[in-house]
Every structure is written in structure tokens, then in C-alpha cells.
Amino acid sequence: MVDYGVCMKGSGQIQANEAMAAWMRVLLLVLLSAAFFFGFMEALTGYDFERLHIFLFNLTAGGFIIIHHSEGGMHPSARSLLFLALSLVYSVLAFLEAYLPAILVSTALAAVVESVRIRRFAFFPAGFFRTGTDTSEKFNQASLLCLSLALVISSLVILNNVYFHWITVRKLTLDVFFLGFSFPVSLITLSVMFGSVRRMDSRWFRLAGQAIFWTINLGVIVFFVFILMELFVAEVAVSSLLTLAVIATFFIFFKYGAPRQEKHFLVSGMGFLLFTAITGVTYIAVHAAAPDSAAQGVILSLHAYLSLYGWNLSGMLVIIRSGEFPLGFNPRRMIAMHWATVAFLVPLGMRFAPLAAAASVAFAIFLSIFLSGRSECRARGR
């Protein structure tokens, strides 16, 4: 189990990964800011850049962070850099609808991810079924496995929808499926959270972690199937079960998570996740009541931003600065800025173009402060 934010070396402690190199933080700042901005490009220009918005955040930045975190160390490996380069190529190809070369790149990306997973864990994920395996490790491996599977399945969806039309499912559009690349990032965030929970070695906590692990992973898969089948009641039932799993995770982490600065940001992330659950249920209800209403698009966009730039980003930022906490800024002010940007400026920016630009600038400023904040660990020379 990784103990995040440990400044001092101690007997019996497993040290956190070394701090991420400064140039990598700058690169991720550019990628995440660009992804956020592309999400508003339709409001500003009338052109849809949704795919670049999704891919740059989830696949390029998110996938790179997942691989770098799984491998450990300060400097990126050849595998993580290869993934970063190929994912950028894939993002552009998918955006331009150059599907055949995109399929080839997707296959190569899946091979890179699997090489990392097998090297770190094993080919068969036997740890999923062992109660003795750390919940944090389970979520880490699940994150890698879901990322590689999403890349393979995306190629199959492209082949089906664009070329062969083996099956016809109204909801199985490429844009809807591509949103699924956010799930591996969610799983790595949960890995970080459970990695800092004390008492996870007790039997009760291990069983609770096992139940939460399977509920979230199977629940999301089943939920997606029900969306494709357009089973409204089943969607509500599964989303309610997932919400209960989120609440249980929040309780465990809030009560037993190690009391360090990064806990503030992860608790804030859980707050975003709870709001994501609420907007998700609201979207299902609105879609069932008024399938063609304009409110659907607004709710879905807000749901996506709360999930990506609220919940997922909180975990990604903690991973990026792992080993450097505490950082030299007031966490409450940073969290307030995060919420003001994502939960206030984003919904307004969807309706008013000038506020879309303001939200993008505010987001870039927030990231810049967080990623450049001085490490108190280094300042104290520990």
C-alpha cells in the first residue's frame, strides 16, 4: 500500500513515488488546459471539438498518468512516453474520423497498456478474487485493464458502426462510447484513495473494500449495457446502487483516510462525484420524461464536466504531486477556486460564450497554481 504524502523515511513505511518531474507537470498543464478549452469550442466558434476534449483529458493525460503511476518513479519510462505520443496521434485521428489508422494506433496503445499491467501484476487478474489483496492494488490493476479493454472495444465499435454494421443499437454511438475512457481514470483515483486509508489490513475493511470494488466495476459495466438497451427502470436501480457504493467509499475515506493535505482534495473530489451521481440520475429522468428537450444536453454536459474536471481531476492532481505534499498553499482556497470554476463558471459558460472563455482562463490559473505550488517537503529539506 502506497502512503501518499510521506515526507520522512520511516521504518516499515512504503515511500510514495518520487515527485513528478517539473517538465512533465508543464506538459500535463498544457494538455489538461487544452482539453478543457476544447470542450467550450462549440459555444465559442460553432464547431464541435468534443472528441478532442474527451480524448486529451481521458486518454492522453489520464492514460499517461495511469501508466506513470503504475510504473512509479520520477522520470517517465519509454512505455509511458510511447503511450503519450500514440494517444496524441489517436486523438487527432479519431477527431478527423480517420478510422482505419485510428484502429491500428488503438491496437498498439492497448498492447502498451497490457505490457505495463502484466509487468506490474500478471496476465490473469487473480488478485481481483483474493480478499487478501489490497483494495488499492485491485483498483490500480482494474484501471489498466479497463483502459486496454476500452481501446480494443473502441476499435470493434468503429468497425461495427462505420464499416460492417454487424449489430444496430441506437445508443451505441462512437461519441457515447468514447466517454467510457473516463472510467479508468476514476478507478486510479479510487486506488489513490484506498491507498491512504488506515486499517485496510483488518478483515472488515478488506471485505468492505472487496464489496465496493465489485459493486463499482460490475455496476458501471451493467449500467452501460442497460443504457444501450434503454431500460429506464434498470438504469435507475443500478445508478442508485452505484451511488450507495460511492457514499460508502466517502464514509470510509473521510473517517479513516490519513489526515494529510491531499485528503482535502480527494474529499472534494468525492463531493464532485456525489454531484455527478445526482446529475446522472437527473439526466435519466429528464430523458425518460422529455427525450427531445434541450435540457438534456445541458445536464449531460454538466455531468461530464463534474465527472472529468471535478472528480477525476482531483485524483490526477494528487498523483501528479504525490511525494511532495504538503504544498505551500491554502487547500481550502484552492478547493473553493476549483468548485467555483467547474460547478459555477462551466454551467454559465455553456450558455454564454464570454463566460466560457472566463471558465477556461480560471481553470488554467487553478492548474498553474496547483502544479507549481512549492513543496513543503523539499523546503524543509526532508
Image (cartoon, rainbow, N blue to C red):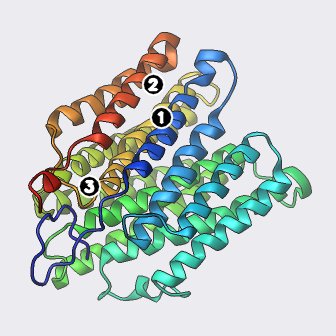
Task: Give the residue pinned by disc 3.
Answer: 247
Q: Amino acid at mark 3?
A: Ile
Work out whether residue 275 or residue 353 is closer to the camera in this orientation and state it.
Answer: 353
Q: Could you tell me how far apart the alpha carbons at marks 3 and 2 are, in whole angstroms?
A: 30 Å
Query: In the picture, which quadrant includes the N terminus?
Result: bottom left
Q: Amino acid at mark 2?
A: Ser
Task: Look at the image and tell me whether residue 214 can be seen.
Answer: no
Task: Look at the image and tell me whether residue 381 can be seen.
Answer: yes
Task: Give the residue pinned by disc 2.
Answer: 360
**Marks 1 and 3 close (CB-CB < 8 Å):** no
Query: Which x, y percent locates residue 43?
Result: 59, 18
Which residue does the image show at 45% across and 65% down from the upper left?
68
Which residue does the image show at 60% across and 68% down from the upper left?
148
Position of 342 relative to 193 (above/below):
above
Which residue does the image show at 66% across and 62% down from the upper left?
151
Q: How many other residues sit within 10 Å of disc 2, few (<14), some (14-19) or many (≥20)?
A: many
Quarter of the figure with residue 345: top left
